[in-house]
Image: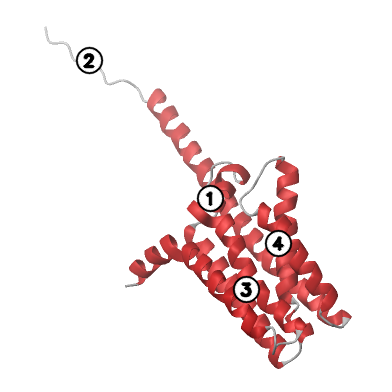
Amino acid sequence: MGRSLYRWLASHWVSGAAMMATALLLLLPLLIPGWPLPLLLIFLHGPGYMLHQVEEHAGDRFRRYINQVVLGGREGLTTLDVLWINLAGVWGVNLLALYVAAWVGPGWGLIAPYLMLVNALSHLGAAARHRAYNPGVGTSAALFLPLALASLMLIPATPAQHALGLAVAVAAHGLIIANLLRRLRALRVAEVQAATGSDAISITKRQRPSAPINRQR
């Protein structure tokens, strides 16, 4: 059951993100009359991030981009990582931010726009560094930056709330990078050990004395 669910999610979660984004945006006209602007802005981060995920992960291209371009062909980012980061991480954090903004105060929901802003800057930074497109950079520029900056300017919040939102967003991305670096180091160690073991076997074979030849007279 667990493996079947994992395979199903790995194959269909991006399509699910597209459908959920569409459904949530279709609800927007019903929410506008009754919801204050700060809460509407936090709400929009959910479907906005889902649209970004469609560009980023359709065809598993972001994971392949990270492993091939950034990590030099090593399997540092797994499919399971992608599911945890995007389903439990992004969707969960955006949903939590919406509830906190509604029940406690809009300023405490700033984790959503800061998460979006930090992600957008990482995509744009990677594009500038490699001077090439990376999966997700289009929606980062066209959607993430305007929505995140507008939210940060229009949602009333204290400096402490801004600091908390930024700190959580940076910490979340830092954990992802730390996990990638940890796995990359492990892969490099495994490569060195494999190469060392191969060399040792080759040397042993070269140094092994040949068996004496028994000649019968």
Percent coordinates x, y for residue 179 in the rendering: 60, 60
Is the Cβ of the residue at disc 2 closer than 8 Å to that at disc 1?
A: no
Q: Earlier in the sequence, mark 3 or mark 2?
A: 3
Q: Residue at x 33, y 67 (%)?
A: 4
Q: Which of marks 3 and 4 is nearer the N terminus?
A: 3
Tell me the mark number nearer the camera, choosing from 3 and 2: 3
Q: Element under label 4?
A: helix
Residue 132 image-quadrant placement: top right
Tell me the mark number nearer the camera, choosing from 2 and 4: 4
Amino acid type assigned to the residue bearing label 4 in the image: Leu
**Residue of label 1:** 61
The correct choice, above or below, for 103 with respect to 45 in the image is below
Is the Cβ of the residue at disc 1 closer than 8 Å to that at disc 3?
A: no
Q: Is residue 76 visible?
A: no
**Residue of label 4:** 143
Q: Label 1 crowding class (10 Å Cα cut-off): few <14, some 14-19, many 20+?
A: some
> How many angstroms separate mark 3 from mark 2 (CA)?
78 Å
Tell me the mark number nearer the camera, choosing from 1 and 3: 3
> How many angstroms separate mark 1 from mark 4 (CA)?
20 Å
Tell me the mark number nearer the camera, choosing from 2 and 1: 1
Q: Which residue is drawn at 79% across and 78% down?
A: 164
Q: Which of marks 1 and 4 is nearer the N terminus?
A: 1
